[in-house]
Amino acid sequence: MGRLDEAMAHAHKGLQQARAAGDLNTEAAIHTNIGVTSIEANRAGLALAHYQHALDAYQAAGSRSGVINVRSNLAQVEMTLGRLANARDLLQRVVQECREIGSRRLEAMACANLGGMLSELGEAQSGYDTAVEGVRLSRLSGESRTEAWAHHSAQTAAGVLGRFHDALDHARAACAGFKAHKDQTAEWINAGAAVRNLQALGRQDEALAAADTLLAEVDARGGWDGGFEPAYHVYRALAPLGDPRAQDLLACAYAAFSAEADLLAEHVPRDTFMHSTFVARGICEDWAAAQAAGNAKPG
């Protein structure tokens, strides 16, 4: 039995007991847990349904912190689906509610995510300021993993603003944080961003050395594990240098990204998803250019 099946089997019994006891908070918590498990199993529709049930139950129970937590989770699903405006709206509401109840921990998490959404939606300076606030609040509340996500959003915003020194500093801080928490995917994304920022700063030897280190680690781990962002960042650093590895990296990034678009097609149109973020648009544009030039390789 898979994790999702096991969770669902236990959840129905728990939900029956919670409803019989009139325990809305427990009912909401069970729905939230199923939502988390569902999104991990790439079942976005099921996650959205259970998060909505959880939101209704927490609202009926008068639990503001519960409502905030579920709205944050809903925003994560919207981000996964590439529906960034929806995610931004949810997170802005979460930030305001966190300030009303004085929850630094939840506000830090919301700011960490909101910073990235604002940057993607054309508000890079506001996104950077919000992400840096997320760093500050994370440190105050002792949430080192949230701090890493806030640095990740800050490096995205700084890159959009052309502030590559700041972007590099934040990418490296994010890498260190994610490494400490053994989050390989997020670590590699920021390691790739660091390579790209080094190249943008004209520090070519350092960019090549960092790329070699990352690619050796990826090879030792058996590949990118379905990740497309880090491969694309390294491609963008190596392509201007004429590095022969660049086209293979682009093919790998496009193949992984296309597979994710297919996986989510039930919930969001493929073309919409494929153009939802800076990285998404970059992958598609560079792949189309490679095809037109006859340089596109199978992924």
Image: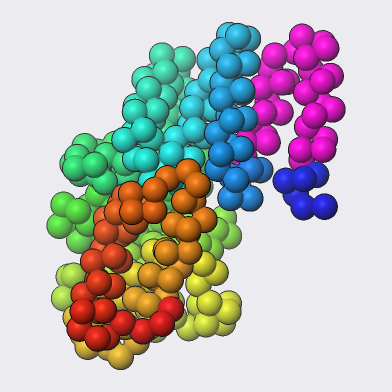
Residue 25 lies in the magenta stretch: yes
Q: Position of residue 63 (x, y in %)?
A: 58, 13
Q: Residue at x 50, y 47 (%)?
A: 266
Magenta part of the chain: 7-36
Q: Position of residue 129 (x, y in %)?
A: 24, 38
Question: What secondary structure is the magenta-colored segment mainly?
Answer: helix
Task: Quadrant for the C terminus, please.
Answer: bottom left
258 lies above or below 72: below
> Considering depth in this image, is 42 or 30 the residue closer to the camera?
42
Give the left or right position of residue 285, taking residue 17 as reference.
Answer: left
Q: Residue at x 34, y 40 (%)?
A: 84
16 lies above or below 191: above
Q: Position of residue 164 (x, y in %)?
A: 20, 61
Figure quadrant of residue 52: top right
* Residue 246 visible: no
Q: Position of residue 113 (x, y in %)?
A: 39, 40
Give the left or right position of residue 3, taking residue 89 as reference.
Answer: right
228 lies above or below 147: below
> Considering depth in this image, is 190 or 14 the residue closer to the camera?
14
Residue 246 lies in the magenta stretch: no
